[in-house]
Image: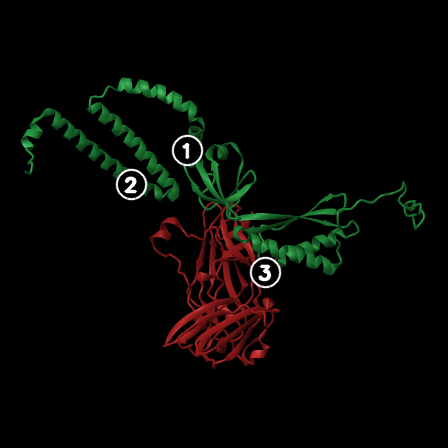
Amino acid sequence: MRSLQQFWSMRRIGEARVTLVRLGPMRLWLARAEKEWGFASEQGEPGAIMDIAQVPEDVVPDKLEWQNTLFHEAPREFLLRPVTPDRPVVIKPEHAIQIPPGESGRFFALLPVFIQVVVVMKKKELVLGTVSSLRPSDTWFGTPYEGDLAYSLPDRASLDLEALKPLPYQIVTPFEIQNKSEEFLVFEKLCLRPQYTGLYSGVRHLWSSVVRIQHEGFFKSTHVRYATTQPDYEEGLMQVAQPLKREDKGLHRLTFGTSFSRDIIFAK
Amino acid sequence: MIATFNWNEIFNNPETEHTFRVVVYTLLSLLLLYTVSFVASRILLKRLSPHYAALVRKLIFYIGASIILVSVMVEMGINLTGVLATAGVAGLAIGFAAQTSLSNLISGLFLIGEKPFQIGDLVRVNDILGVVESIDLLSIKIRTLDNLFVRIPNEAMIKDPVTNVTRFPIRRMDIEIGVAYKEDVGRVMEILEELAAANPYALDDPAPLILFNNFGDSALQFKFGLWFEKSNYLKLRNSIMREIKERFDREGIEIPFPHLTLYSGSATDPFPVDLKDRNPPKS
């Protein structure tokens, strides 16, 4: 497949046929019968692979856990929709980074994409389920008494996008940290909430909208903002998913400040 | 013949009018009390669990009903001095007989105030481990993990240590591992780190604890502590134990049985064995 953007287009599947979708480590098996749709997934080794092909039934592994949906007449058309991970993700830089007062830093993080299996019946879309391209490890962001269950990313955030070498199953999330305080900042970790970002497909990989962090001082506040516009790092981006949630921009935010002020931790 | 009521006669009779007034007063008071307790429980539902709100509602109702009863008795002209004197003596007798119940009741009130656990929490009381099903004035009810019903008096909950297993969102699972003395300690610790990083249910933060704990009688003892989200206990336990065993087998790391080595007095000299006749005579 030449472009990742083709991956998200509508397709048809015949009856009693199996389609194998390979995206990075994900192996997604799709099968359709006259009155039934089924899908199953397994994880392989991470890589740059990106293809969709119809395969004979006898190559389907035996030990898969299938998720089946019954229909009066199973729809033929389906599409794969990329979505952001279903939990917050914790991002750490590859090494300690200091940001002087008045300066800013731009980082890039790689998130694994999650894929929704969507069938189209009578022009309406029905989501059969969601699978992760890569099952990240669990982590906790917060104290032992309260916090968020999050995903831990296998790759550290980097200043250099080229050094990251993003693969087709990865979402590149740009985030900027502006130090508006009078002290040096050492960025330790960030809890990113992907449901507030939109998704855009480039030729080789996915992008999310930009996250902006403004730090005004340890005794003032830190604001984390999720932009709603597409990033400008690649031309010809195609929006493939809207943010699942929107930041509150009304009176609540003006009165109480951002609800994400604890999502970034700076070492002191 | 159908009797007809003469309302004038009824209300002109002081005694009847008084009784009617007392009945109306009682009914209106009970209605007001019911309304107050209902509204109070609705307000408390926003701050307390449904169970505590229901308990407080019952308390308000019983105290209010007692006040109404006393005021009705006063209104009816009943001499309370005698009643109170009798109640005092009866109360003393009942008090001695109901010490345990009173203690449980008072303990229940303390439990309501302290809130060491809520309905749905997994708690351990002595050797009983189970889910709290209800918290009542005299006891709490627990359903054990093998589906047994246990009633624990509130007094026991106040006197004995109670462990709330699910109070906090994350917990640490400590696994004691022994490896043979011949093994490389550094390599064992590296492998345990890799296992923790690879298991999706083991949290990366807080970091796992890998401690070379002790020189045991039969093995080098390690403590392997993995943090996990409280609902993933079984998934982590099953997966990590299998992964430890499989990885140790692959790396050739021995997990020794408890054993005792006998020396004859020197670590190098063989233990002397005197071999008698191989075919002992049959008796």
Residue pictured at 77% horizontal, 50% vertical = B180
Disc 2 or disc 3, which is closer to the eye?
A: 2
Spatial CA distance of label 2 from label 3 is 56 Å
The label on residue B38 is 2
State the mark number for residue B281: none
Same chain shared by disc 2 and disc 3: no
In screen coordinates, is A200 left or right of A98? left
The residue that mark 3 highlights is A156
Foreground of the two, B203 or A71: A71
**Mark 2 residue crowding within 10 angstroms, few (<14) / some (14–19) / many (20+):** some
Furthest-front residue in this view: B283
Residue A49 image offset from top left, x and y in percent: 58, 74
Give the quadrant of the C terminus of chain B.
top right
Q: Which chain is red?
A: A
Question: Which numbered disc covers residue B109?
Answer: 1
Q: Chain of mark 2?
A: B
Q: Is residue A5 visible?
A: yes
Q: Residue at x 50, y 76 (%)?
A: A31
Secondary structure, mark 2, is helix
**Label 1, label 3: how many angstroms apart (C-alpha)?**
52 Å
Q: Estimate the x, y position of residue A71 in percent, counting from the top left.
A: 41, 74
The front one of B1 and B134 is B1
Amino acid, disc 2: Phe
Q: Identify which residue, A104 or A250, lies in the foreground.
A: A250
Give the CA separation, mark 2 to mark 1.
20 Å
Q: Which chain gets the green colouring?
A: B
Asked where in the image residue A70 lies, by quadrant, the reply is bottom left
Q: Are marks 2 and 1 on the same chain?
A: yes
Read off the chain for label 3.
A
Q: Secondary structure at mark 1?
A: helix
- Chain holding disc 1: B
